[in-house]
Amino acid sequence: MASLRIEIWKIIIFASFLFYICYITLPILSVFVRVGSDFITQLSNPVVVSAIKLSIITSSITVLIAIIIGTPVAYALARWRFRYKHTLETLIELPIVLPPAVAGVALLMAFGRNGLVGSYAPMYIAFTTLAVIMAQSFVATPFYVRSMRSAFDSLDMKIEGVARTLGASEFRTFVSITLPLTVPSFVGGLVMCWARALGEFGATLMFAGNFIGRTQTMPLAIYGALQTDLQSALSLSAIQIILSFTILVFVKILGRRSGAFV
């Protein structure tokens, strides 16, 4: 009787596993089946090329911003002790769980023409390429900060202490000792930040609009093409799938080598 229950449990596990794999694989496979040989042809489509180019440029700038701003923020969260730290940490991570449409509305209310800050800005921010970068940074930077904060937390502070006793300044210790030890987390956080920025849709649509060549990134181009040009939408979807899969494989390979990620 006990062996029968074990066999039934194994069957349930296998059936659930098989069902879920099919559920994930079938839609992805359908994209590549439907796009067919038109995939290569669509790569010369001006709308597709423009969306790819804008996505790569804006997401790359977003990653650079995340590194410049996110690294000091992560270090402060990991090493400094101050009042309301947990509240501020929750606020910093809020965009991770915030619905993208809400993030877009919030950005518009802050930096739009009549926004709290935008009304005093010397230039129009909303519905520009700058707005795309700001929307991507808002939703993607927390992923990098979270990764780096965990990396800083896991480091043995005694190593830094030895460098300080040998006469190294805090900044030199950070650059020559701390940062090199966080390379796996740095790369992993950077890649996940870039992936999130590359796939951003809701906040960008609400705050930057959907204008070809100016604010239309790949997700927005897919949304627009679904109404007029299905093949373009399928080609862009296939590119997004390939990029996303490549990113995940890269992170997993890095994790196995460093033990930092699973």
Image: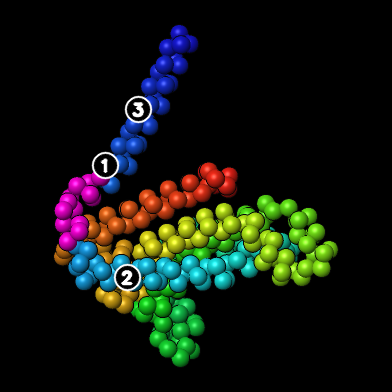
> Looking at the magenta stretch, what is its main secondary structure?
helix
What is the distance, in whole Å, between disc 1 and disc 3 at their CAs? 16 Å
**Residue at 42%, 89% in the rendered image:** 123
Q: Based on the displayed image, in which of its 4 quarters is residue 8 positioned? A: top left
Name the element at disc 2: helix
Q: Position of residue 42 (x, y in %)?
A: 19, 62
Q: According to the image, label 3 marks what residue?
A: 15
| Image height of 78 relative to 8, above or below | below
Q: Name the amino acid type tagged 1.
A: Leu
Position above or below: 10 against 211: above
Residue for point 21% across, 71% down: 46
Image: magenta residue range = 29-41
Helix, strand, or loop for circle 1?
helix
* Amino acid found under the numbered disc labelled 2: Lys
Is the residue marked by circle 2 packed among few (<14), some (14-19), or many (20+) residues within 10 Å? some
Density class for disc 3 (Cα within 10 Å; few <14, some 14-19, many ≥20) is few
Local packing at callout 1 (Cα closer than 10 Å; few below 14, some 14-19, many 20+) is: few
Q: Residue 45, located in which quarter of the rendered image?
A: bottom left
Q: Which residue is mark 2?
A: 53
Q: Could you give the CA–CA distance between mark 2 and mark 3, rounded to whole angstroms?
A: 42 Å
Left/right of residue 26 with respect to residue 157 in the rendered view: left
What residue is disc 1 on? 26
